Image (cartoon, rainbow, N blue to C red):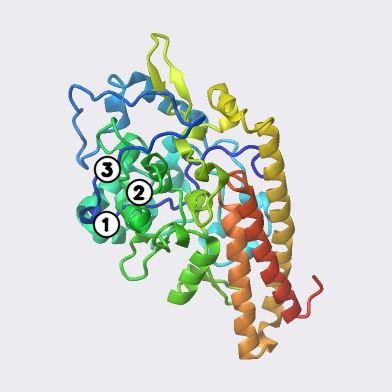
């Protein structure tokens, strides 16, 4: 099985997280939208500290500097260390077809389930997917220090060598990413994501955007190497629209070594899965990522605060009790959604593997038009599959949409099988 329960919409996924960019385009920070009736954290906003601690050389107040001012938030943030790299699922073992699907790309060398935020720098430093040609844009969301660097220096920061920049980074994902240096409000520090929201920036709570700024689909712009989203606004945040965007610009992440197809690697489109297009049921009701993954808590002295231990909503009674009005058995329902999604992922992975191998065998005998069509089917089918597999909830964030995207993968494969005279 993949993961028996999804960790959180806020757990970093994939080697390259994302974001940062043009500080000059940044709008003023927004106040969080009001919580919907029956949902949302009951914890009050943090009180302003008497004095902001000294920032580091990047302009970032690191988490440890806040520990005496916000002890409850800090202690629960540090609890994320329990979500460690040890014992994580190896996707190349779970989905052996990935070696074929990612042939010629770094993900075929290593692809493990993500660990919690405190391990973000460790994870990117240890991944086998980087090499001497890797750029610093692969650090985009792994540390607030790089976010501050990009906001200060602009696109040139993306073009620096990965190893050179990584050596300067010491702070994993922490307070600055979501609050800048003001814990009394949430602020989207990754400015290119703000730009990608376009005129819809006020339609989604900032509390969700601070998660979405790193949990989204992105690519590196060919000329500037800047981390960039393939859309502007919520309507463009669907797998179909994103695929059309990439097709129109002729973008590819790599060329498949077996089929020669120009391939795309989906990243971790949690935000798009929840808020894009028709949106998920929870998004339409006004719930935020924090409502489901950050429990309201009370300290021994009676202080109320929001827990910063990012959890599966079924792991904390304070969250789960708010779900019971609509879900008679939310844990059981999540297990069912995830089983339906992962079972189908395995089924279609086997179909993709067979298609890729057959296309590789036949490509030299196909006419140019048929070969181009067959390669496009490979590109499209795999993108729809990947879009679902790498979204970190195994379908639980939007089960209907997960199945719709797998349907699109299957439709592409059926056409490809027919084209190559394969029995489906």
Q: For mark 3, what is the residue?
A: 29
Q: Residue 6: percent from the left, percent from the top?
A: 59, 39
For residue 376, which quarter of the picture? Answer: bottom right
| Mark toward the viewer: 2 or 1 | 2
Q: Give the SS element for disc 3.
A: loop
Q: Depth check: 361 or 319 in front?
A: 319
> Is 238 situated left or right of 156 in this image?
right
Q: Considering only order in the chain, which callout, 1 or 2, is on the residue closer to the N terminus?
A: 1
- From where the camera sits, is residue 136 visible? no
Q: Considering only order in the chain, which callout, 3 or 2, is on the residue closer to the N terminus?
A: 3
Image disc number at residue 157: 1
Q: Give the SS element for disc 1.
A: helix
Q: For mark 2, what is the residue?
A: 202
Q: Considering only order in the chain, which callout, 1 or 3, is on the residue closer to the N terminus?
A: 3
Q: Depth check: 411 or 421 in front?
A: 411
Image height check: is 181 above or below 301?
below
* Identity of the residue drawn at 52% across and 68% down: 243
Image height check: is 95 above or below 177?
below
> Is 242 situated left or right of 65 in this image?
right
Q: Crowdedness of circle 3 by 10 Å Cα count: few (<14), some, many (20+)? A: some
Q: Residue 328: percent from the left, percent from the top?
A: 68, 30
- From where the camera sits, is residue 165 visible? yes
Residues at marks 2 and 3, CA–CA distance in whole angstroms? 11 Å
Q: Residue 76: percent from the left, percent from the top?
A: 43, 24
Q: Give the SS element for disc 2.
A: loop
């Amino acid at each position: 099985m993949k993961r028996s329960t999804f960790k959180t919409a806020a757990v970093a996924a994939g080697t390259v997280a994302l974001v940062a960019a043009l500080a000059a385009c940044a709008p003023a920070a927004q106040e969080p939208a009001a919580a919907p009736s029956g949902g949302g954290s009951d914890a009050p906003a943090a009180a302003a500290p008497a004095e902001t601690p000294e920032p580091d050389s990047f302009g970032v107040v690191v988490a440890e500097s806040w520990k005496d001012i916000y002890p409850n938030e800090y202690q629960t943030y540090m609890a994320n260390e329990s979500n460690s790299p040890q014992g994580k699922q190896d996707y190349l073992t779970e989905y052996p077809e990935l070696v074929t699907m990612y042939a010629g790309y770094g993900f075929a060398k290593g692809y493990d389930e993500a660990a919690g935020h405190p391990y973000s720098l460790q994870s990117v430093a240890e991944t086998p997917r980087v090499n001497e040609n890797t750029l610093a844009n692969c650090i985009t969301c792994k540390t607030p220090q790089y976010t501050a660097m990009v906001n200060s220096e602009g696109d040139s920061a993306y073009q620096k060598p990965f190893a050179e920049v990584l050596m300067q980074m010491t702070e994993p994902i922490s307070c600055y990413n979501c609050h800048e240096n003001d814990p009394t409000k949430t602020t989207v520090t990754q400015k290119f994501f703000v730009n990608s929201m376009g005129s819809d920036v006020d339609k989604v709570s900032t509390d969700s955007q601070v998660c979405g700024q790193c949990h989204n689909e992105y690519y590196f712009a060919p000329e500037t190497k800047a981390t960039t989203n393939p859309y502007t606004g919520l309507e463009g945040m669907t797998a179909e629209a994103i695929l059309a965007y990439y097709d129109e610009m002729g973008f590819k992440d790599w060329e498949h070594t077996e089929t020669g197809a120009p391939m795309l690697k989906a990243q971790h489109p949690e935000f798009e899965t929840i808020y894009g297009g028709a949106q998920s049921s929870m998004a339409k009701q006004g719930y935020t990522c924090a409502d489901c993954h950050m429990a309201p808590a009370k300290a021994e002295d009676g202080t109320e605060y929001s827990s910063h231990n990012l959890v599966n909503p079924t792991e904390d009674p304070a969250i789960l009790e708010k779900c019971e009005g609509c879900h008679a058995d939310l844990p059981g329902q999540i297990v069912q959604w995830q089983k339906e999604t992962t079972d189908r992922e395995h089924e279609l992975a086997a179909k993709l593997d067979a298609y890729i191998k057959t296309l590789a065998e036949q490509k030299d005998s196909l006419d140019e038009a048929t070969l181009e069509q067959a390669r496009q089917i490979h590109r499209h089918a795999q993108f729809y599959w990947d879009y679902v597999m790498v979204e970190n909830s195994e379908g639980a964030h939007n089960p209907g949409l997960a199945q719709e995207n797998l349907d699109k993968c299957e439709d592409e494969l059926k056409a490809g099988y027919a084209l190559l005279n394969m029995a489906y």
